[in-house]
Image: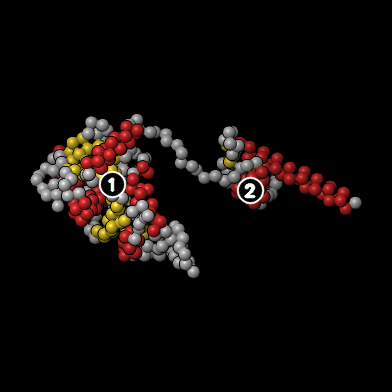
Amino acid sequence: MTAFVCLGRGVHLWKKNATLDSKLMEVVRDDVAGEPQTGKRWVRQSLSKIQEALQEQQHVQLSRETIRRLLNKHNIRPKSNVKRLYPKLHPDRDKQFRYIARQRAAFEQAGWPCISVDTKKKELLGLFYNRGTQWCQEAQPVNTHDFPSYADGRAVPYGIYDTARNLGYVAVGKSADTPEFAVDAIVWWWQQFGCHLYPDAPELLILADGGGSNGYRPRRWKQQLQEKLADALGVTVTVCHYPTGASKWNPIEHRLFSQISRTWAGTPLTSYAVILDGLRSTKTTGGLRVEATLLDAIYEKGLSVTDADMKLLMIEKHDLCPNWNYTIRPRTSGSNT
């Protein structure tokens, strides 16, 4: 008798769950999407919206956890967006990648400097959460919110990566990420390191992203390269920009910035000294070493360059993708040191 009762109760629960399941799928029927080949499915509504719809349409009241469990039976789980689509690829994208590869190979074969440049993520100074973990007995308490008003300052790390020698250099700014700041960082690298590592090099190759302070659009980026690097130091500069949306292929991203993030993972960046120490202690078994400095100057945003000033620049655009590839030559005689 006991076994019969238990069996009957189980059948009753099964029928009840089947009924709830069918009512749930009736509610979400028009909001289910998926991939036919993999069988993965998802719903556009949130659990709270489904909960409300069940109560209004089917007069069924279920907890969100029960709804989640029933959806899981149908392989419907919460999914985030995945960045996989490239809706508007530039027609010259592949040509530019090939051209950059040829330029880089030519400079490195000649023994001339080739640097990859970019601005790393800006950091707030203070007890702010920094992703990652550390081996310690007790976790470091940090602020519950990352409000800029809580910060003791802001650090703007501009990176320079020597592709041939596997060496990194970072100039940390205190204000804005501007073309003037970017060029000052490159000038610091050249005067302190570049001219000694490449004393006989007549030309410098810069690999940069398509946007940002060192993008191909800002006029002031080109003007500052002309005045502070080409004219003042007598260095001919060739710049090759990666196509829009292709910054992940810039060598500095995966060869330098990724290693820096690992070095200070889980460490609150409380001061410029902590940041500089973290940068200088970054190294890999493959030979990467990093030098760092602090640039105290205050950089102003929004400075423009007139058409008349642009006409005075010694810019020679390349035949292939001229907006992305150009060479800036000195207007006056200068010294490489």
For label 1, the residue is 164
Q: Residue at x 61, y 42 (%)?
A: 76
Q: Is residue 72 left or right of residue 218?
A: right
Q: Residue at x 40, y 56 (%)?
A: 262
Along the viewing direction, whichever of 38 and 149 lies nearer the viewer: 38
x%, y% of residue 115?
A: 27, 47
Is residue 77 visible in the rendered structure shown here?
A: yes
Dividing the picture into quadrants, the one containing residue 146 is bottom left
Distance, label 1 to label 2, CA atoms, is 53 Å
Look at the picture and state if 286 lies above or below 41. Answer: below
The local secondary structure at tag 1 comes to loop
Bin the neighbour count of mark 1 within 10 Å (Cα to Cα): few under 14, some 14-19, many 20 and up: some
Instruction: Give residue 68's mark.
Output: 2
The local secondary structure at tag 2 comes to helix
Q: Is residue 22 left or right of residue 313?
A: right
Furthest-right residue in this view: 1
Is residue 226 visible in the rendered structure shown here?
A: no
Look at the picture and state if 190 lies above or below 150. Answer: above
